[in-house]
Amino acid sequence: MDFSPTDLTKTVRQRNLPAFRKVCLYCGRENVSRNYTCDCGEEDWRAEYRALGLEFDLGQAGIRRARQSFYEYDFDDPRGILQYALLPFVNQEGDVPETVGLTSFHHLPRLSAGYGCGVYLKNEGDNPSGCFKDRETLLCLLNARRKKASNAVIYSSGNAAASAALFAQQSEMHLLTFVAGDTYEEKVEFIRNRGSDVIVIGDEDTSFEAGYRLFSQLNYDGLYADNGYDNWSVRNPYRVQGDKTTALEIVRQLSGHVPPWVAPDYVAVPTANGSCLAGMWRGFQELFELGVIGSLPAMVSVGIENANPVYKAVKEQETNRPVKGDIHKLAEPDARIGSIIVAEEGYDSIQAAKAVLESGGTAVEVGRSHIRKALFDFLEKEKELALEHAILPEPASYTALAAIEMLVKEGALKPYDKAVALITGHGLKATEVIDELIGENAPVQKVAGRIIRQKRKEMGPKASKKGRRLQVEASRSAVAKAFIQLDEAHQVGS
Ligand SMILES: [Zn+2]
């Protein structure tokens, strides 16, 4: 069902949109594969990691249009991130299920005064599913529609699946989510309650990475594409395009929506597999190349101690091969707290490490005590702001605030510097862990409780039909069989 690249170029030219090509990140060849893989290289990991990126072919008219879309980007426009011209398929016909992006941005006056520099937060918890993943999912959805795919698969146990389930549900698409056996049942229920079918791979000894490997190999074999399923996992090259818009919005908001347009000096991003950081860096670079901003921020990757492959890749300056974290050394309390950013392998660690190094940034690691301190600093010192805008960062997001404090202590941040912490998602989906972190502190419990009640009202209802659940052994043939079985059940059911 894919357009040929020539058709696509023609279509976008007619609509005066910039043309782009999908290219392999490793061999540089143009690539139109339906499963987003490239057959270059012998190494097994290439069947698993993200292989494709987009290259835009702008021309003078394209550059003018892209710049114009930045100047006119309106935070009250229901088109949300799709106002930006440098995204694929933005002029597509058909309604967008939700407004994505246009999330709030705040100066933190007390933390700034305490640290002696400008501290800001970008609150991605404002997105429809309460997480930055919606920016990525929307781009996947537009591409799936273009391909006329009405089914999608994703491998995720957390925010990405919750976001995908919400968008699939509202677009009447069938979503099939794969999770590893070690995923909490509570999370599986959350995804099923949003209408997605779920395949649980293996038992509680099956790790995220082991499950992802099986999922990816079946993708490489063409199982999903051959059966009309688009792959919305980290492999999908359109995902990071959505993350570019976070950079655009930060520049607009930090500049007070009037020129001169300024970029922050530092941007701290909670990092697991690295896609969000890589995408945001691409966004800042584009604005620089368009001549909109005159400087670029230093990108700061922050993760959990020993579960942070991007940190390792940056320290070893390894940007050619994926790097594995020392997850066997991960402390148990850290594992629980950071569940959504704990990673053994970073499936975009090559791109993320390149971004950190190119930007002159750094990578830091934090543990439970840093996260807990950042939570108290924020909910005590910035209480009024948190209550007014219902901001309660998810546990992993406090790592970004903790990273800024670490850079202040190291003397890296100067008094005139502006540092932005990316709050990746809302704490509503992790109330238990937040309770644990707060402990017996009644005033802070009260603040968190009020924000959660307020946010619950804003979030949408559950799906009318709960998704199916299948648990299978962790083997290629068993997972493939389960996929076929659920696909058939879906066809009979719908
Ligand atoms: Zn290649």
Image (tube, helix red, strand yellow):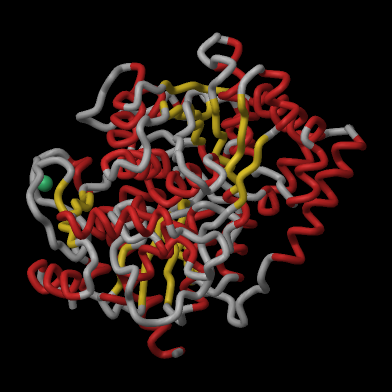
Residue lying at 29% horizontally and 26% vertically, measured from the top left: 358
Residue lying at 19% horizontally and 70% vertically, measured from the top left: 12
Residue 270, how many percent across, how many down?
51, 36
Closer-to-camera residue (356/465):
356
Instruction: Report the side of 46 relative to 420 (left or right).
Output: left
Q: Is residue 492 above or below residue 166?
A: below
Closer-to-camera residue (464/30):
30
- View extreme (front): residue: 259
Residue lying at 72% horizontally and 31% vertically, measured from the top left: 109
Instruction: Report the side of 243 relative to 253 (left or right).
Output: left
Q: Residue 93: name its quadrant.
A: bottom left
Instruction: Report the side of 183 relative to 140 (left or right).
Output: right
In the picture, the quarter occupied by the N terminus is bottom left
Q: Is residue 140 above or below residue 1?
A: above
Taking the image as drawn, is residue 178 in sight? no
Q: How many marks?
A: 0
In the picture, the quarter occupied by the C terminus is bottom left
Residue lying at 57% horizontally and 50% vertically, measured from the top left: 124
Closer-to-camera residue (130/67):
67
Residue 302, how many percent across, how many down?
50, 28
Instruction: Report the side of 444 relative to 139 (left or right).
Output: right
Residue 125, how many percent across, how many down?
62, 52
Closer-to-camera residue (372/4):
4
Q: Is residue 381 above or below residue 317?
A: below
Q: Is residue 342 above or below residue 222?
A: above
Residue 129, how many percent across, how many down?
58, 61
Taking the image as drawn, is residue 437 in sight? yes
